[in-house]
Image: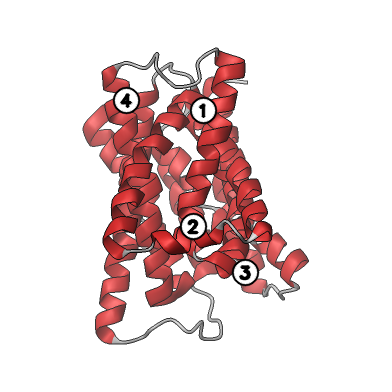
Amino acid sequence: MTGMQLGELSAVGAAVLWTLSTLAWTSSGRRIGALAVSVHRLMITCVFLTVYGGLVRGRWLPSDASAETWLILGLSGLMGFFVCDLCAFKALLMIGPRLTLLLQALSPPTAAIISWLVMGEALVPRQWLAMAITISGITWVVLERRPPTGAAHGRRSSAVGILLAVTAALAQAVAMMLSRKGIGQYDAVAATFIRVLAAIPGYVVLLTVVGRWPAVFVAVRDVRAMAIVTVGSVVGPFLGVVVCMIALRHAPTGVVATIVNTMPVLILPFAIVLYRERVSFRAAAGAVVTVIGVGLMCWGA
């Protein structure tokens, strides 16, 4: 297996793990609120990363990273775990999941362009074609007409929601580029720890400004929700992000971003099994197109 293939397979693994963690965030968020989930998942992830670092690396904290690594990966964590996640959630509430996920498809080409401008990282024509096919499949699934979700439809609200969704896509693209630039040969788990630590101050400031600390503390009493958050933290911010960092070490940013953004399609089987949802022919066809795009992305690497 070549390094490129390892990177692409790792990106597929990250997409699957993040799809599973999304189910956990949805379930726990309904009980304690999304902001509380966001804060607690990072704190729980820190515990796992600390234990892993101490037992496996012999370092409880990523103290062996250079100042440059801390700076670049720290900015990546702030953009990804804080700016992207916060904007994406607000967009979901204002314009609904379909349009939010559609606009998130802007992330892969944006990541590819930013990486080309900043790092000189170019994609071959086959990879651009695979990216277009993959995004087309995702878009076809996301744009399927569904019953109203209750999202606000006012003109001003829609405009703000679209702006937030675009901001989330751009933040995700920048975060991936910075992660690829900052990780180098550094340990993927320790790199993830730096990113998580950098995002926490953002939430501390936000919770203080909006006065939501009481809600965060009360959420701890919900044992079931916290158990779900713990499982989601292991699957997503811990394992998922670590695998994504491995992918970024071996594959171009645009390729990784494209594969990771297959989550709207990957979640379809879980919707059938867990929520007994009926998947239309269009959704199934979109999933097939997406798989073809990812396969073309990985083929011949």
Disc 3, SS: helix
Please tell me whether mark 4 or mark 2 is closer to you in this view: 2
Q: Nearer the viewer, residue 191 or 197?
A: 197
Q: Nearer the viewer, residue 277 or 150?
A: 150
Mark 4 and mark 1: Cα distance apart in space: 17 Å
Could you tell me residue 193's position as x and y percent?
Answer: 45, 30
Q: Which mark is residue 70?
A: 4
Could you tell me residue 297's position as x and y percent?
Answer: 52, 40
Please tell me whether mark 3 or mark 4 is closer to you in this view: 4
CB atoms at circles 1 and 2 under 8 Å apart? no
Q: Which residue is mark 1?
A: 246
Up-down: is 1 above or below 297?
above
Tag 4 or tag 3, which sits nearer the N-term?
Answer: 4
Mark 4 and mark 2: Cα distance apart in space: 30 Å
Q: Residues within 10 Å of mark 3 (few under 14, many from 20)?
A: many
Tag 2 or tag 4, which sits nearer the N-term?
Answer: 4
Mark 3 and mark 4: Cα distance apart in space: 42 Å
- Rendered image quadrant of residue 101: bottom left
Tag 2 or tag 1, which sits nearer the N-term?
Answer: 2
